[in-house]
């Protein structure tokens, strides 16, 4: 899905630069050796690979939760959309309260309208929302944090096909202001939406 988004990409802001990354949980078995990746605003790059290939580890490295053995990672302000929206919200607090904990809520109504998300749902607790509604709330929270880099870890895997499509369209509509790095196991989805695909073995 390159289309017009690829035009002039070389002039767009770099939101993630990974150079010669080397990392493994043991020195004997490295997940990454001299791995490099550049992501610009307006791009979506997808990471594909089997379980244990280091997809989620890469996000942990980008977020700064793990330290590389060698190499360099530079990133712009980032936020994350997680695979399981129910585990990414505290079960006993309202959605809007949890959003307010990490982001400014000015303009939240306008963003809800753009996303087709009923603002009344923000006053509810996570268990009162469907999976698709809660994943929209997760995207809403991530965008209100005003990132330049959005890390999306299997953002549609827990959703049915129609809701998957809606969620992906929401993510793609954010590309004017962010670059997206996405993990998925769905090769067809990756081919449909990605500017580039990086396969891990």
Image: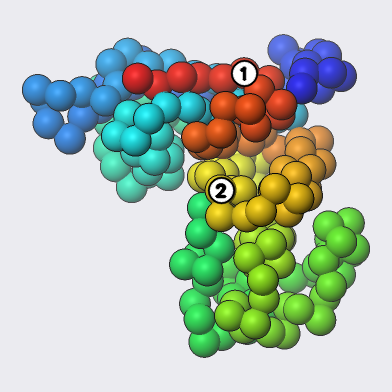
- Please state which of the two labelled residues, at mark 2 or mark 1, is closer to the viewer: 2
* Disc 2: which residue: 157
Residue 196 numbered tag: 1
CA gap between label 2 and label 1 equals 20 Å
Quadrant in the rendering for residue 35 = top left
Q: Residues within 10 Å of mark 1 (few under 14, many from 20)?
A: some
Image height of 122 relative to 147, above or below? below
Residue 122 visible within the image? yes
Residue drawn at the location 82% of the way across and 66% of the way down: 117
* Residue depicted at x 30% and y 22%: 32
- Disc 2 crowd, CA 10 A, few/some/many (<14, 14-19, 20+): some
Image point 87% across, 61% down: which residue?
116
From the top left corner, tell me how far across and down residue 91 is, in percent. Answer: 50, 81
Pick the quarter of the image with the N terminus: top right
x and y percent of residue 44 in the render? 66, 29
Q: Residue 43 appears in which quarter of the rendering?
A: top right
- Can you see residue 104? no
The one of 129 and 5 positioned closer to us in this rendering: 129
Q: Is residue 183 left or right of residue 126?
A: left
Furthest residue in direction left, as rendered: 28
- Of 108 and 93, which appears nearest the observer? 93
Residue drawn at the location 57% of the way across and 20% of the way down: 197
Q: Position of residue 169 (x, y in %)?
A: 79, 43
- Earlier-in-chain disc, 2 versus 1: 2
Q: Is residue 142 above or below residue 137?
A: above
């Amino acid at each position: 899905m390159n289309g017009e988004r690829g035009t002039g990409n070389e002039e767009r802001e770099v939101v993630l630069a990974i150079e010669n990354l080397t990392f493994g949980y043991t020195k004997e078995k490295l997940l990454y050796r001299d791995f490099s990746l550049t992501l610009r605003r307006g791009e979506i790059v997808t990471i594909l690979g089997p379980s244990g290939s280091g997809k989620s580890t890469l996000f942990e490295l980008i977020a700064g939760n793990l330290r590389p053995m060698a190499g360099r990672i530079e990133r712009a302000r980032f936020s994350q959309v997680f695979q399981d929206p129910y585990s990414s919200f505290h079960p006993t607090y309202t959605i809007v309260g949890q959003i307010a904990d990490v982001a400014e809520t000015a303009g939240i109504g306008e963003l809800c309208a753009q996303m087709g998300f009923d603002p009344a749902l923000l006053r509810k607790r996570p268990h009162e929302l469907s999976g698709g509604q809660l994943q929209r709330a997760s995207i809403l929270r991530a965008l209100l944090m005003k990132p330049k880099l959005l890390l999306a870890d299997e953002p549609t895997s827990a959703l049915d096909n129609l809701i998957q499509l809606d969620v992906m369209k929401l993510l793609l509509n954010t590309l004017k202001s962010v670059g997206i790095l996405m993990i998925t196991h769905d090769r067809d989805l990756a081919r449909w939406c990605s500017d580039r695909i990086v396969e891990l073995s």
